[in-house]
Image: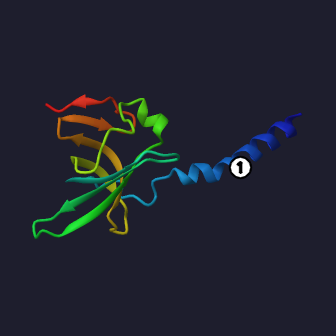
Amino acid sequence: MFFAVVFTAATVFAVSAPVLAHHGNASHEIGKILTLTGTVTEWVWSNPHCFLKFDVKDEKGTVTRWVAETQNPVSIGKDGWSRRSFTPGDEVTVTLLPVKNGSPIGLVRSVTLASGQVLRTGADAAPTQAP
């Protein structure tokens, strides 16, 4: 009986390891947080992850299209996000963890809307009004 339990536990671990690896942060600069202000071009509300695409203009006028990934609709929906949170043309300030290779891609920490509403992800994800 002991061996059956150990075998079952090992099998469950082996099957679930790729799922855990998929949700890792190895590709992100964990110690680096960027705050970017830009204009929404697209909001993708879908499983397994939602994506906010937005354009950021630098001091020289060069526009960079950023893609910011967040969690699935069920998880962020509980924190005040919805399929109608953003529309193209909305001005947003996005706080994110950028990827290590320097591409304009990141993992969303929070998004502040022009109204002052702050949408957060993760453990401190209660929606708030900016001070």
Q: Residue at x 29, y 45 (%)?
A: 87
Q: Position of residue 108 (x, y in %)?
A: 34, 48
Front in this rendered view, residue 131 or 49: 49
Residue for point 46% across, 35% down: 75
Please name whichever residue, 77 or 110, is drawn nearer the observer in this view of the structure. Answer: 77
Residue toward you, 74 or 126: 74
Q: State the image coordinates of residue 5 (x, y, percent, origin top left).
A: 82, 36
Q: Residue at x 25, y 29 (%)?
A: 128
Q: How far from the left and from the top, in percent, is residue 100?
A: 37, 65
Tell whether 118 sits left or right of 81.
Answer: left
Closest to the observer: 41 or 96? Answer: 41
- Numbered disc total: 1
> In the rendered view of the protein, which quadrant contains the C terminus?
top left
Where's residue 88, x and y in %? 28, 50
- Residue 117, quarter of picture: top left
Please tell me whether residue 78 is drawn above or below residue 69 in the rendered image. Answer: above
Residue bearing the label numbered 1:
15
Residue most extreme to the left: 59
The three-letter code of the residue at mark 1 reads: Val
Q: Residue at x 58, y 49 (%)?
A: 20
Helix, strand or loop at label 1? It is helix
* Residue neighbourhood size for the residue with mark 1, other residues' Cα within 10 Å, grouped as few (<14), some (14–19), many (≥20): few
Locate the N terminus by quadrant.
top right
**Type of colouring:** rainbow
